[in-house]
Amino acid sequence: MNQEDPGLEPDPDFATTDHFARKAKQGDPASFDHMYRRLAPALLSWARLRAQPGMDPEDLMQEVWIRACSLFPDYDPEKVRFRPWLFSIGKFVALEQLRRAAKIRKNQVEPSQLVGESDFLSQCPEEITSFTHRLAKNEIVRQFVSYCLQMPQEDRQILIHCGLEGMSTEDAATRLDLPLAVLRKRWQRIRERVRQQPRMAPLIESLYPD
């Protein structure tokens, strides 16, 4: 992984994340590097927006990625796009972390007693960890998350589902119980508003589905 690249720019040789996912299925290990570099800003933003008290967004982000890597042999690029598949795993990991945090908060268990429940972080390569730490300090990502938190809740949910998670507008409309035409119009307006924020421009390729 490029140690100088904060993960905010599109790949020099632009190709979709799904292109790299297919190459990874064909046995190209470098494709995982490309996928992580492309999706890391969206994954970190999502983790910060989803994290509850007692949850560390960076830990959540890394655990989601390591879990996805462990499940990748079962991934079928012909059935589902990589980004929605990754974030479907993310939702399960977030629920697990939330349950662990609740147990600790209620003094039902000590943190050390939960180590066995989730050892995925111990499997995280140092290269991924150091890249994540650098990205976590990036001011543009912080500004994006802050911008999202100032949105009306329903608009924020649309951006999370359709932008970060790569969910189809049909599925997002069902999830949010909105007419499809209404959701599509609002999603278009949300994208336009975000693109009008000049400092967030480098994030666009990483945040939105390709």
Image: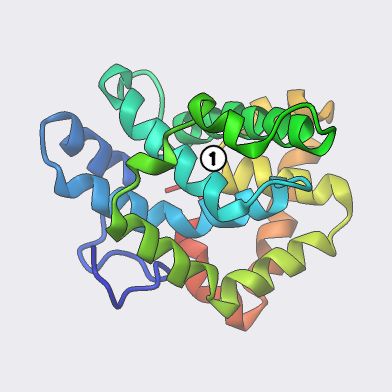
Image spot of residue 122 (x, y percent):
38, 42
Q: Residue at x 32, y 74 (%)?
A: 5
Q: Nearest the camera: 186 or 56? A: 56
Residue lying at the far bottom of the rendered structure: 198
Q: Nearest the camera: 141 or 54? A: 54
Which residue is denoted by mark 1 in the rendering?
Answer: 166
Q: Is 7 on the left or on the right of 195, as rendered?
A: left
Tell me the colour scheme of the image.
Answer: rainbow
Residue 180 visible in the shown view: no
Q: Nearest the camera: 110 or 38? A: 110
Q: How many marks?
A: 1
Which image quarter: residue 12?
A: bottom left
Q: Nearest the camera: 20 or 132? A: 132
Q: Residue at x 68, y 35 (%)?
A: 110
Residue lying at the far right of the rendered structure: 152
Quadrant where the N terminus is found in the figure: bottom left
Residue 159 visible in the shown view: yes
Q: Is 24 on the left or on the right of 82, as rendered?
A: left
Up the image or down, 29 lies above or below 179; here it is below
Up the image or down, 105 lies above or below 38; here it is above
Q: Residue at x 59, y 26 (%)?
A: 92
Category of crowding for the residue at label 1, using alpha-carbon neighbours closer than 10 angstroms: few (below 14), some (14–19), many (at least 20): many
Image spot of residue 103 (x, y percent):
76, 29
Which amino acid lies under the numbered mark 1 shown in the image of this protein? Gly
Image spot of residue 112 (x, y percent):
58, 36
Q: Residue at x 35, y 46 (%)?
A: 124
Which image quarter: residue 139?
A: bottom right
Image spot of residue 179 (x, y percent):
82, 29
What secondary structure is found at the residue carrying circle 1? loop
